[in-house]
Image (cartoon, rainbow, N blue to C red):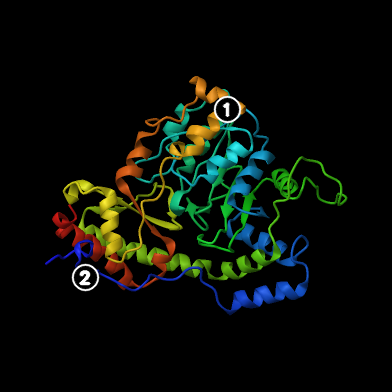
Amino acid sequence: MAHLALRGGSPVRTEPFHPWPVFDDRDKQALIQELEAGRWGIGSPSIEAFEKRFAGFCQARHAVACTNGTDAIYIALQALGIGAGDEVILPPYTFMATAVAVFMANAIPVFADIDPVTYNIDPESAAAQVTPRAKAIIPVHIAGNPADMDGILALAQKHNLKVIEDAAQAHGAAWKGRRVGALGDCGTFSFQSSKNLASGEGGAIVTNEDGLAERLRSFTNCGRVRNGLWYEHHEVAGNHRLGGFQAALLLAGLERVEEQMKRREENVCYLTGLLNSVGGVTLAGTHAGTTRHAYHLGILQYHQEEFKGLPKKRFIEAMQKEGIDCSSGYIPLYEFHFFRHLAEKLSTYKALYEGRVNYRSGICPVCERVCAEEAVWLTQNVFLGSKKDMEDIAEAVRKIKTYVDEAL
């Protein structure tokens, strides 16, 4: 008789994990108030109130709300003067928006490999990618886990690079006691439905620089400037403004963020101890400077040698059959179709395919190994549940390890 659900046995769990998004009467009242106020877009008091509160949450002087996380990076690049032919260094272990925003600015994405413990950009690999054309670096705080900002900022200072923190997954994460986002020149956030602070769609850019904040606002608002005329446009810029209903939801969501962060931290700590007892699966590590992890994802490091060489894909399939919501996560960005085929057709990027920069397999071997063999994702809502949920995850791992021959 089979033990693993993969082979017809009884699964560890059948009930779903904690639902997401989370909402209550505060959200409903906020939306009704916004509706009745009658100013649903520019001029909505909810937008201004959210920008002020989110800046405070991020320990930043300014926050500029916008349409989404992709546009946030694009706006930041524009405001910092990054454009055609400029090289922007970033990790390939991130959502495609990090690189797409660089393409949108007519700049060139250049990939640096990732750290094998944290899965964040490796400053030493990034240093090897610096050329005279490099103008910026985008560290991604992947999964809510802060990148090595000491290493990144030192590299940026040495080579006069602008630093845009991609903090789309890192609301509330902290490096040496300071929340991520405004450690570099600016930081970008997403409020898409899956994010720890969500409004369906939405984004924001934070900064401590007054002049940069004004430029960010201009590029978000059709090139207008503060105190200018309505049809006075100083920059070639689009409309990337956040709506009032999204701002209302975000204000309500901010009231729950701290409580939810604590719950995730408690559950991750508990799960870590359980997994350490089982062996074969660990949580991705953090840098020494990390003082808070946001846990948008709990990235498990799967060690297939402890499962008789069971491939990661098969391990994930077995976990899913046991009732554990998990997935494989990213592939290296440069392996996507739009890098291999679309980019080479754009005249702006012809230089890429003349050997100066390439997007061929093998350029970031750590990232490629992590994607193919190691990383297994648990989403943030899983960590909003009970200790029993954590015990089920560990039990599923133990069960697969014990009866791995059935999976093989």
- Tell me the quarter of the picture where residue 277 sits: bottom left
Q: Which residue is mark 2?
A: 10
Task: Write the residue at 51% across / 68% down.
Answer: 21
Disc assigned to residue 349: 1
Q: The residue under label 2 is which amino acid type?
A: Ser
Mark 2 to mark 1 CA distance (whole Å) = 53 Å
Amino acid type, label 1: Tyr
Secondary structure beneath dot 1 equals helix
Q: Residue at x 50, y 33 (%)?
A: 341
User: Relative to residue 376, is residue 346 depicted above or below?
Assistant: above
Q: Position of residue 307 (x, y in %)?
A: 18, 51
* Res 278 → quadrant: bottom left
Return the residue found at the far bottom: 25
Question: Which quadrant would residue 42 be assigned to in this image?
Answer: bottom right
**How many labels, in total?**
2
69 and 328: which is toward the camera: 328
- Mark 2 in CB contact with mark 1 (< 8 angstroms): no
**Which SS class for mark 2?**
loop
